[in-house]
Structure formats: structure tokens, C-alpha cells
Image: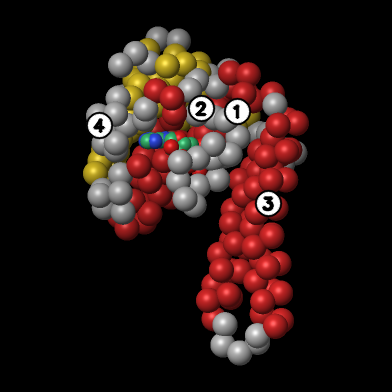
């Protein structure tokens, strides 16, 4: 399959996003209110109501925490960062989640240990989101290949999984706020990811074929140490 360039105009749709947020948060709130009404009426042993309320509250919490990553007027700290170090930090962070899902990381880092100019917390978030999606795509477990390639002025980072791949009509919607095919997804991960890459003047593309897994390829400008 041809690589499809991602990111784009989807990012500037603040109004659409606000409407989406209102909608997404109203759903769990409506559910919570409904179950509280029921509880009021029948206070005896309605354990499952508490479970539903708890899980809807978690959902609100998850949506808000992902949105805060995007909206937080956080102090951007740009510095020279070793991609090797950054990617090792990210895999350490995700190790437990990977093991629990029978997923193994295969790292193949360029011997030149390329550096980039970035806010390392934000760029970590990029790879956390891409690798998490890979883990979530492989319900039966598998490998995630994390590869860097020093290519002159640029460094390429590839995140490849052995999941089911992504259909063309879904590729077209990647990065759209709240677009998710998962029951517990927020559909915010890739929007945030593309936004960060764009802010760092990088690019991202995806190559995927149904049944063949997916490869996300990120490119950043290299800097000297
Ligand atoms: P979420 O993970 O909350 O669903 P994302 O923005 O991270 O939101 O991803 C949006 C959608 O893109 C996912 O629901 C999934 O359908 C698709 N997707 C993203 N990455 C992959 C992948 N590696 N393999 C298969 N599908 C993917
Ligand atoms: Mg995601």
C-alpha cells in the first residue's frame, strides 16, 4: 500500500471539537444521572448501578485528561534530545501494559543515535499514543517494531504492529476528534499526536493494509548534539 500522509486541516476545527466534547461528556453524565435517580428510588443492593456510575465517571476522567494534554497552556521546553533515550523511556513506561497484552517490543535503533530539537514530554506522548494503538490493535498479542533511521537531515521513526491493519475509509478519518472504533476509546490520541508532530515541524504517514498490520512513520529534523 502507498503511504498516506496524515495530520492536515483536521486540527484547526476548534468549534467542531468543542461540540464533540460537549456531546462526549454529556453521554456519560446522562447515564450517571439516570442511575442516581434509580438509586434514589431503590436503595437496596443495587451494586451494578455503582459499577456503571463508576465506569462512566472513569470515561469522563479519561476524556478530560486526554483533552487537557491538548489544551494545557503547558510550559514548552525545547531542548536537544536523544531519540534512543526518548524511545527507551517510552518503552519502559509501556512495558507492563505490553506484557499484560502479550506484546513484545522489538527495537532497532540507528547506531548514530540521532538527536532532535523538541519538548521531550510532548514527543514522548506521540510515541506513547502510537505504541498504545499498536498494543490495542493486537488483541491476541504480537510484536511491535520500533525503528529509527538516520537519513541525513532527517530522522525517521517507524512504529509497526502486527495487528489487523487499517481500512482505507478509516485511514481517511485518523486524527479526527473523537473518531474511534473501540468501545472504550476516546478518539483523541491521534489528533493529539498529529498536533504535536505538526508543532515540531515533523511529518507523519501511515502505511497499512487490512490483514498486514500497520506502520506509522514519523519524521523530524535532526540536530547536532
Ligand atoms: P482511540 O485509540 O481512542 O480509538 P486514536 O485517535 O488513537 O483513538 O485512534 C483512532 C482509531 O484509529 C482507532 O479507534 C482505530 O480504529 C484506528 N487505529 C489507530 N491506530 C491503529 C493501529 N495501529 N491499528 C489499527 N487501527 C488503528
Ligand atoms: Mg489511541
Answer yes or no: disc 2 within 8 Å of ligand 1. yes
Task: Establish if 83 lies above or below 141.
Answer: above
Q: Is residue 200 visible?
A: no
Front: mark 3 or 1: 3
Task: Establish if 206 lies above or below 136.
Answer: above
Residue that appears at 61% across and 46% down: 66
Marks 2/3: CA–CA distance: 21 Å
- Residue that mark 1 sits on: 195
- Residue that mark 4 sits on: 211
Residue that appears at 71% across and 67% down: 33
Considering the numbered disc 3 on the image, is that residue within a helix, a strand or a loop? helix
Of pointers 1 and 4, the one earlier in the residue sequence: 1
- Residue that mark 2 sits on: 173
Point out which mark residue 23 bears. none
Of pointers 3 and 1, the one earlier in the residue sequence: 3
Residue that appears at 52% across and 34% down: 190
The N terminus lies in quadrant: top left
Pick the residue in front: 126 or 93.
Answer: 126
Quadrant assignment, res 52 = bottom right
Residue that appears at 25% across and 49% down: 140
Considering the numbered disc 1 on the image, is that residue within a helix, a strand or a loop? helix
Pick the residue in front: 28 or 70.
Answer: 28
Of pointers 2 and 3, the one earlier in the residue sequence: 3
Q: Is residue 52 shown left or right of residue 43?
A: left
**Is there a contact, CB below 8 Å, between mark 1 and mark 4?**
no
Of pointers 4 and 3, the one earlier in the residue sequence: 3
Amino acid at each position: 500500500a502507498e503511504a498516506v500522509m496524515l495530520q492536515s486541516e483536521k486540527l484547526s476545527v476548534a468549534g467542531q471539537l468543542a461540540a464533540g466534547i460537549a456531546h462526549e461528556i454529556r453521554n456519560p453524565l446522562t447515564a450517571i444521572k439516570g442511575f442516581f435517580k434509580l438509586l434514589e428510588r431503590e436503595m437496596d443492593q443495587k451494586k451494578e448501578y455503582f459499577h456503571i456510575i463508576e465506569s462512566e465517571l472513569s470515561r469522563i476522567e479519561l476524556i478530560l485528561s486526554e483533552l487537557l494534554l491538548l489544551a494545557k497552556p503547558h510550559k514548552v521546553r525545547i531542548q536537544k534530545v536523544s531519540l534512543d533515550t526518548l524511545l527507551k523511556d517510552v518503552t519502559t513506561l509501556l512495558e507492563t501494559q505490553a506484557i499484560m497484552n502479550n506484546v513484545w517490543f522489538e527495537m532497532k535503533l540507528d547506531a548514530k543515535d540521532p538527536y532532535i530539537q523538541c519538548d521531550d514530554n510532548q514527543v514522548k506522548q506521540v510515541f506513547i499514543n502510537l505504541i498504545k494503538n499498536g498494543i490495542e490493535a493486537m488483541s491476541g498479542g504480537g510484536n511491535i517494531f520500533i525503528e529509527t533511521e538516520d537519513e541525513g537531515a532527517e530522522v525517521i521513526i517507524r512504529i509497526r504492529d502486527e495487528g489487523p491493519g487499517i481500512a482505507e475509509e478509516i485511514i481517511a478519518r485518523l486524527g479526527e476528534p473523537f473518531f474511534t472504533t473501540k468501545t472504550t476509546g476516546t478518539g483523541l490520541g491521534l489528533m493529539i499526536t498529529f498536533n504535536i508532530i505538526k508543532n515540531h515541524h515533523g511529518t507523519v504517514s501511515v502505511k497499512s493494509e487490512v490483514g498486514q498490520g500497520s506502520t506509522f512513520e514519523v519524521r523530524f529534523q535532526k540536530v547536532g548534539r
